[in-house]
Amino acid sequence: MISSSQKRILSWLSKFSSDLENSWDVTRDISLPGIADGLGVVRSALNLPLKKLQQSEMVFRRQAHVVGGGTRKRQVFHITSKGREYILENHPVSKKEKSQGIIFGNRPIMGEVIGRDDLTNSLLETLEKSSLLVCGLPGIGKTTVVCELSEKLSSQGTIVRWANANEFSDLYDICNQWQLLDPLPRDDTALQDLILQITENQTLVVDDVHLISQRHISPFEELSKRINQSSKARIVFIGREPMNNFSSLDKIQILPLEDQYGAQLLGDEQNLDERLLISKRLGGHPLALQLYQPEFDLPEQSINVQRYVEEIVLLNLDEQQKDSLNLLSMEPIPIFSKNSLVSESIGIFDEQALLRWSSNNLNVEVNHLIRNVRRSFFDTSQQKKLHQKLSDHWQGITRNIQEDMILLFHQISSGDPNTIDLIENHLDSISTNKSNFLAVLIEQALEQNPNSSDLHYFAAKVAAQRCELSVIKNHIDKVDEAKKAELNLQIAIFEGRTQDAERIFLQSLEGQDPHVVNKLAISAASRRIDDRIFDKKIDGEQIIEVKKYLSRIDLNKIKKEIKSTAVIAITLIKHSLALLESDIETAEQLSSSVGELGLDAESLIFNLRSKEIIYRLKNKDVSIQETIQFIDKAVSVQDNQIYSDSIRLNLVEALIPIDSKLASQQFKLLSKPNDDLKSDTYYRYTARWWFCKSYIEPQEKLTCLRESISIFKKAGCIRAAKNLESRLHSFI
């Protein structure tokens, strides 16, 4: 006679190809922990039914390498042909059919959820009226309940978007996990606008919201309020108590399982009275039940789950295993298991239900309750030693950008005396899409050294990159006077104070080396040329400023090795200036003279002449088709992606008022904004790209305008930002 547990195991294993039977590498899903997770039962509940299935020759066991579980071979299980025949003839009907609806993001894979039907139905009703904050103790089943809720929502046709937070998460990271749009804006308000616009009647989930740093929490607070006030979307935050944020949301407390359901979680092979007793003694706490092993001593009465972990579960680890668990517990985020310092122990910990896995079964972390318990055992000195070991490890292996941030986290946490130098090295190298990490790490470094003017300066620099004006202001008073001018300039730009910004910039030139003055003057002239929006004529004052900066440049005092680059930059500025003044003759003379520079000038000549033909297009002197053909040629000879994209973007700007359909076609040929590229030139391109998108996709106008404003400010283009802000206010 085949029991219900055996049927469910056979049904689960039948999902996997027989090809795995001879594979060296197999998925975690057919290991004991993987089967348990898939079925939603504790591991110990599978021992007897798996043994009986092996005896009946419906399942066989072997040793294999489990992907992500270290190099040590582990027990895996395969269904036999006899087992597959049984399933075909007697396919068990699941208590719930998994929905075919759309769920975006990396939602954890959950098996059958036990004892939560009434709760999830109640949450479903509440969600019809308002968004939710789902709270509870660690391991109480918060994520499991919301996973079940997401299934029910999806079965009703609701789109669900799932994201997993950590202490470095910002709103952009969460939106990226939600798979909202590509590319996403960076500005927090623009992101909120986008969410409200495109997620109508959808449900947005953020798990582990309590982990989000105070450095990044404000946009989430604002988003929850805006959604509750004016959106048909719903948001579900999942967090550990105590939760003092998100007062605008309905707070739902997750309670332990009733004993009958706790007994069900333990399987059905053991005597029911015994299972009821175990559930009662462990307080109906799902994680405690998951951790339970028959060889463990059962507490005399219901016990606090943390004490249970400390006094019973962890006591069954040997000293080496405890050391490895300590190290893994100090990792700040889920890590690629193969790259872990303790990768060889991962399989052991997995078999003991001590780990949480990502949906791909490759990234892993210690279960948060276990992690918190282990961390509580160490004083500051001991923690620093663990961080030092992990720092040495990560420094010695090939890393991606995220792992670079993990390394920096451990270096800072270990009290590395070179912390300031380490952070400074990352300021220029870190891509924008990891600035959320760097912002938090600098704040952590400041906790150790709150009076460091360098750290306050770094915090302000990252804030400037993220267009966070209030954060810059929070740090500027603690920055050395020599560096305050740079930050005051940034504040003036963000606040749109054109005259103050100009004054501060001119003051920064005083007493500088002539080479530096030349470089800054060229940069300023280029920025002034681009400090405009394509559908608004440049004002005379701006042209005067450009000429003023050009007059300050002394080519005789430019270093020989960069002179040719400077000459090209000046030529581009003068050529743009001539066209803005409708002096096509001077512009043509400049493009013709490029060959005399002694450079490989083809790409530059085409760049300049592309602007000339676009000028003629605006004046109806050439056809659209002739212009497009020339632009295609000009783009093809460029060896710099920014130049080629800028040329085509010029065409898009010219076509928008002439032929919106053609403008849209050309816009689609442009490179999307790339967070790995950082320069004022590229920022200006990106700002213009978002502004054009506001025309090409008018349904996203609000989001696009906000993002364009933000990037124009970052690029120092005050006038363009102010013009767009006026449009934004009229649009709102």
Image (spheres, rainbow, N blue to C red):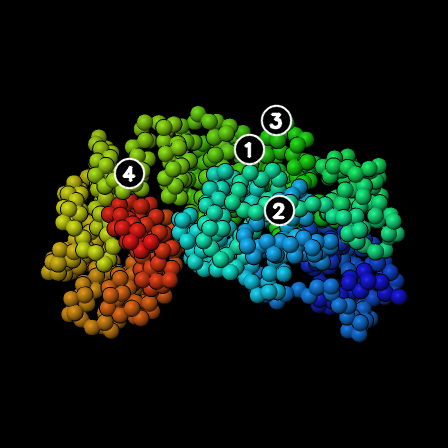
Q: CA distance from mark 4 to mark 1?
A: 35 Å
Which is in the foreground here, disc 4 or disc 3? 4
Which is in the foreground here, disc 4 or disc 1? 4
Residue 513 can be seen in this image: no
Inspect the image, locate mark 4, and give the three-letter code of the amino acid beneath it. Answer: Ala
Q: Nearer the viewer, residue 180 or 612?
A: 180
- Residue 270 position, x and y percent, is 86, 52
Left or right of 299, for residue 388: left
**Marks 4 and 3, the one that precedes in the sequence:** 3
Left or right of 689, for residue 301: right
Left or right of 211, for residue 468: left
Inspect the image, locate mark 1, and give the three-letter code of the amino acid beneath it. Answer: Ser
- Residue 144 position, x and y percent, is 66, 52
Query: CB of mark 4 within 8 Å of CB of mark 1?
Result: no
Inspect the image, locate mark 3, and give the three-letter code of the amino acid beneath it. Answer: Ser
Q: Disc 1 marks which residue? A: 413
Q: Disc 2 marks which residue? A: 252
Q: What residue is drawn where x is 60% and y is 38%?
A: 242
Q: CA distance from mark 2 to mark 1?
A: 35 Å
Q: Disc 3 marks which residue? A: 381
Which of the numbered marks, if any, corresponds to residue 136? none
Furthest residue toward top: 451
Q: Secondary structure at mark 2?
A: strand
**Marks 4 and 1, the one that precedes in the sequence:** 1
Q: Secondary structure at mark 3?
A: helix
Q: CA distance from mark 4 to mark 2?
A: 45 Å
* Crowd class of label 1 (few under 14; some 14 to 19; many from 20; radius 10 Å): many
Q: Disc 4 marks which residue? A: 492
Where 120 sits versus 430, above or below?
below
Q: Determine which quarter of the picture holds residue 323.
A: top right
Query: CB of mark 2 within 8 Å of CB of mark 1?
Result: no
Q: What residue is drawn where x is 45% and y is 53%?
A: 230
